[in-house]
Amino acid sequence: MRASFNRRLLDQTPTLLFAVALAGFGLSTPAFLTKENLLNIGVQAAPVGIVATGMTFVLLTGGVDLSVGAAMFVAAAVAGKLLLGGQSLALAATAMLGIGAIWGAINAVLIARSRIAAFIVTLAMLFIGRGFALWLTETRAMNLPDSFLRVGSARFAGIPAALWLLGLVAGAAQITLSFTPFGRQLHAVGQDQEAARKAGVNTKRILTWTYLLSGIAAALGAVTALGQLGAVTPKFGENYEFKAIAAAVLGGTSLFGGRGAVLPGTLIGALLIQSIENGLVLRNADPYFYPLITSAIIFVAICLDRVRSAILAKRTRRHIRVEATT
Amino acid sequence: MTFALEVRGIEKSFSGVPVLRGVTFALEAGKTLGLVGENGAGKSTLMNILGGGVQADAGQMLLGGVSHAPRTPADAARAGVAFVHQELNLFPNLTIAENIFLTAFPTRSGAFIRYSAIYQRTAELLREVGLDTPPDTPVENLSTGQRQLVEIAKALSRDARILIFDEPTSSLSARECEQLFKVMGQLRRRGLTMIYISHQLGDVLRLCDSVVVLRDGIVAGSGPTREFTADRLVVLMVGRALTQLYPSRRGSARSEIVFEARGLGEPRVIHDISFALRRGEILGVAGLMGAGRSELARILFGLDPHSRGAVFLEGKALHRASPTERISRGLAFLTEDRRHEGLCLDASIADNLMLVALRDFARTPLKLLNRAMSRATLQKIRERIRLNQNARDEQPVRTLSGGNQQKVVLGKWLLVQPRVLILDEPTRGVDVGAKFEIYSQILELADGGAGILIISSEIEELLGLCDRVLVMNRGEIRDELSRPEFDRERILQSALPAELFS
Amino acid sequence: MESGSARPTTTRLLPGAAEFFGRLAQSDYLVLGLCVVYLASFAPFTPGLLSLENLGNLLQSLLPLSIAALGLTVVLIIGGIDLSITAVIGLTSVIGAKMMSSSHGWLADSAFAVPAALLAMLACGAAVGALNGIGVTVLKLPPFILTLTTMMAVSGFAVWLTKSRNIGGLPEGFSSLWASLWFATLLTAVIAALLHLLLARSVFGRWCQAIGFNSRAARVSGVPIQGMTFAVYVICGVCAAVAGILFTAQAETGSPVLGQRVLLDVLGATVLGGTSLFGGRGKIHWTLCGVLFLRLVDNSLNLLSLSIFTITMVKGGVILAAALLDAARSRLTISRK
């Protein structure tokens, strides 16, 4: 009884933290709880949320993708080049998604086919990608035409386009995870890859699609972020891998694979991280503190994950004696 | 007469070592075949070939008269070969229905799982195997026995033509075994063809229509079950009659108590465990799987915590001493889980043998090893445990047979000359020859004055070795028998649960 | 058995060749051989590769990297990983410079400035290592994500300390000694020898190996896992700090981003040398060979005046190749019964 209560409490921790953060900043900073600012938080959380959706898939398989930030940068750099070369917006956006897919495919081949640890493959890809994009942009910032910003700030039914996109991606992702064979098999792969393979699940196919989707999600995230920033800077996409992992893990997705959800988990995680950052900005906190705060949040998230899986392990442990409840 | 399965002249070698040498037998449709043999006789390889895990070098298999040569496990599954393994292949984070249909989900508009359909079909299958649980129950909420029934339901869902049980009872309670056998009986009446692999010869004789005995990759004997007795099976398996299974004991227990537990308890695990072990005494712990014997051993060795009572080694309380500390005070523990806790499989024989005793060969200040001394000791211990002489010191332990691996585990503890040795299933997965040598080592250690606590699921083994036997049941000691009182029936009675779980 | 069947055709058709490549992939001298082959094939096209001056540069850049990689080797052997090495290098650089800088250092112009700064730098490395060690042992967090977090926090802290500015004006005595080739070489040799003794000849090394191969079995065999793991992360942190001291001396400035680019080099060199990411397998001289190879590639591409971005990409490729080789190697060991 008690254990299951504890576990339920733990499952709700992100939501509670979110509520606490909203209340805390709301009380101390009047500008925080306005409708505009809340929408703003949502919009700012959209890129991380979309990237984190892809990351949730990867974490569910028991892997990790450290290259999402670099993938965003490469996609944005190519799009910037195209746009400044006079190409259309649609072509640039399509090119970004294409690059995301290719990027994911490279990761997928290396991880699914040659069975190297995902973190080492994607770490190498992080460096390769950032090197490549810096070379493309010649380490200069590129200001994009206003058209990109206009699309980025468009609203439908009073809700910013970025939020629509976030909702759409998260919804489609959760439906895929819960109601399709692919989604359920992905859970099996994350629980025990070898057992899934023996059971006849095409693990290579699952892993391939997972990293492919993560690459595409990273590219979509880059499109969303570009729509808000309007420029490709040498720091574009930096630390997105951390934020995406933090959002997913805060939302209850386990680093050990097999357990987690995009809705509401990852979405809440992304909103939580963004609210804290937004609140800090409103309070004029020292920007040099942000990395410290972000790492503190991730640390809390992985500790929560650890406690959660410990409780789960305890619960599944076999009891030899039935003790009278005292 | 139609044969469900015909195996003709199957041969297979690994790295030049023949494992199967012309295995031939046939299985009638609707019958159950018992497959027995020592570890390393080739049973697993044969089943792997049938299941598409590996390919035969030569020979032929016919499944219902049609050539069967699967390249992958998926091929074999499509051909109608289904397995119920000793390690269960279920995913605890998915529901029963999802586990059963994992690779064959029926979908709506090509994308979404038709949950109503799989729940309905799963409910039917669960009824067939006698499991009364909703189809959407997560597997993590099921007991081991229930999970095994789900495995069978899974096999039935595939319209399996041959169902292969690979050591299915090794982690089941007596009651769960009975349930399994009942379901197998029903399946047999329905005309399903089955292969049953087990070391429990009694079960094989009881359940099967015919028997195939493998020895060193050849069929040492086969025929209808009525032609066999357990004794004859053993003779065929080892190829020679065993005149004496247990080495004779020279010494006997002394009066001095070396190891003692007083009122040990841990909620939901063990309750009020007290016993005293004398120098030179061999004390057995009998009980069914899951009676808390291994858990007791882990608590005694300091691997798991306990909340009540105390453990004394040579009169001194151990309190919360770590395994490291307990070892230095003369305690040793041979675990039941050789692969995961007993050995570093990829490390060399030498490194594994020396692991516990390392500190004795170190010189300060950097704790550098005295290599000449350690090499000499290594040679001595290898001879003492009679390790396979062809194995090189630097060879990974993984390459050894089960029996030789277990000798390495025993050897590493013998090196530190323990005052008390706890052995948990010391001969599980070990061939007959190696068993005898392991018994000899245990007796020798006891004769030298060490206290031995030995846990085993084989009552025979305890009766053959021990001075005294404790019987555990649901985390408690239910009975204690000294040598003159030894009685199989009485041990079994105390081990069986008095009243069943609700 | 599974793995034996993974490559049935190769073993059957070309037993000799498979055996040969198996041996080669597992040889201690594979990477050293690669270095010689690389040198021989690039020297003719790369002007100045074999010049005395360039070889000096090569050695100088190789030393701090080796020390950091040696620390990582020990962590990899117990089956862990430390991604915070680069952050430690940055932090030690900043702390050391803050203490001894003659412009506005805390101990500016004091006689104890240099020794005190050195001690503080080592303490920094040990402290971060200890934090990692506690996270892995007490909190039981997965090392890669934990050290990734530490990396972010520590480098964030270093940047905050300096507000992204470099600190100059380091004492003459510090730079001249610690940047001198003979001293750095000697230091690296001593550390390498010490770690080699520990790993190959002592109880410590056997325990590390046992933990890496199978930590549960190690625990049952009485290996003090918690203490060992903690110690190993501290050793890695201290090694990173020593590397940080050398880097700082060579750059003659304290900078929070000093180590930023070397993570790939350190990890790549170690894995390339043959130390396994799966734990248990690793040797000091393997890592030294790995570092040599990676620096050789870096140095020759520099001489061919390729951009730093291209070089980063090439090195990313090298680490991928190394990881591929590692995976292939562990498969080979298992299948060679």
Image (cartoon, coloured by chain):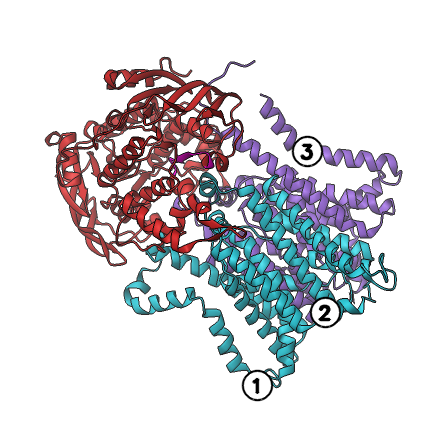
Chain colours: A purple, B red, C cyan
Marks 3 and 2: same chain?
Answer: no
Marks 1 and 2 sit apart, C-alpha to C-alpha, by 35 Å
- Amino acid type for the residue under numbered disc 3: Thr
Please provide percent x and percent y for residue C11: 31, 63
Q: Mark 1 points at which residue?
A: C45
Q: Earlier in the sequence, mark 1 or mark 2?
A: 1
**For discs 1 and 3, the disc positioned in front in the rendered view:** 1
Residue A100 in the figure: left or right of residue B361: right
Q: Measured from the top left, where is residue B275 in percent x and y?
A: 40, 19
In the image, A59 versus B109, the foreground residue is A59
Percent position (x, y) of residue B230? Answer: 16, 30
For disc 3, the neighbor class at 10 Å (few under 14, some 14 to 19, many from 20) is: some
Distance in Å between CA atoms under marks 3 and 2: 54 Å
Question: Dot 1 surroundings within 10 Å: few (below 14), some, or many (20 or more)?
Answer: few
Residue A92 vertical placement versus B225 (above, below) = below
**Which one is in front in this view, the residue at disc 3 or the one at disc 2?**
2
The residue labelled by disc 2 is: C177
Q: Are marks 1 and 3 in contact (CB under 8 Å)?
A: no
Quadrant location of residue A239? bottom right
Q: Which mark is residue A13?
A: 3
Magenta region, residue range: B328-337
Could you tell me the amino acid type at mark 1?
A: Phe
Query: Residue B334 magenta-drawn?
Result: yes
Please state which amino acid type lies under the numbered disc 2.
Leu
For the residues labelled 3 and 2, say whether their Cβ atoms are less than 8 Å apart: no
The one nearer the camera, B220 or B118, is B220
Answer above or below: position of C237 versus B276: below
Disc 1 element: loop
Q: Pinpoint the chain carrying mark 3.
A: A
